[in-house]
Amino acid sequence: MEAWARRLGVTPREIHIRPMKRKWASCSSRGRLTFSTDLLHQPAEFRREVIVHELLHLKLPNHGRLFKALLKAYLKQDF
């Protein structure tokens, strides 16, 4: 999480892990990231996609073209 946050140039205000029924994660407008405990049981690649997706919302709060392009570009990078 920290390494990806640095790479994207963002700083979450809070990070929480808790049970969630309908989502893998969420990002509030105040910079709070919440991840589902179920995510811990998913493959590493999927966890990475969710983490990068939510961190990127700290830069872009929507799912527009720019968001999708940046998400795709970051996920192509090896780490």
Image (cartoon, rainbow, N blue to C red):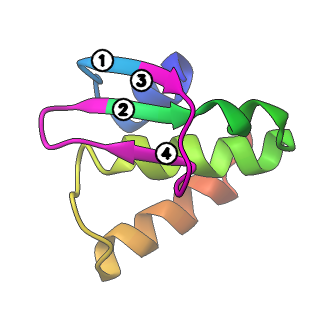
Q: Quadrant of residue 33?
A: top left
Residue position for label 1: 14
64 up-or-down from 59: above or below: below
- Ranked by sequence position, the earlier of labels 1 and 2 is 1
Residue position for label 4: 25
Disc 1 crowd rating (10 Å Cα; few below 14, some 14-19, many 20+) is: few
- Indicate left or right for 42 with 6 as reference: right
Distance from disc 1 to disc 2, alpha carbons, whole Å, reads 6 Å
The stretch of residues the image draws in magenta is 16-32
CB atoms of marks 4 and 2 within 8 Å: yes
Report the residue that reaches farthest toward the left.
30
Residue position for label 3: 6
* Residue at figure coordinates x 70%, y 42% from the top left: 47
Query: Disc 4 on helix, strand or loop?
Result: strand
Which amino acid, by three-letter code, is at mark 4? Ala
Residue position for label 2: 33
Distance from disc 3 to disc 2, alpha carbons, whole Å, reads 15 Å
25 up-or-down from 69: above or below: above
Distance from disc 4 to disc 2, alpha carbons, whole Å, reads 7 Å
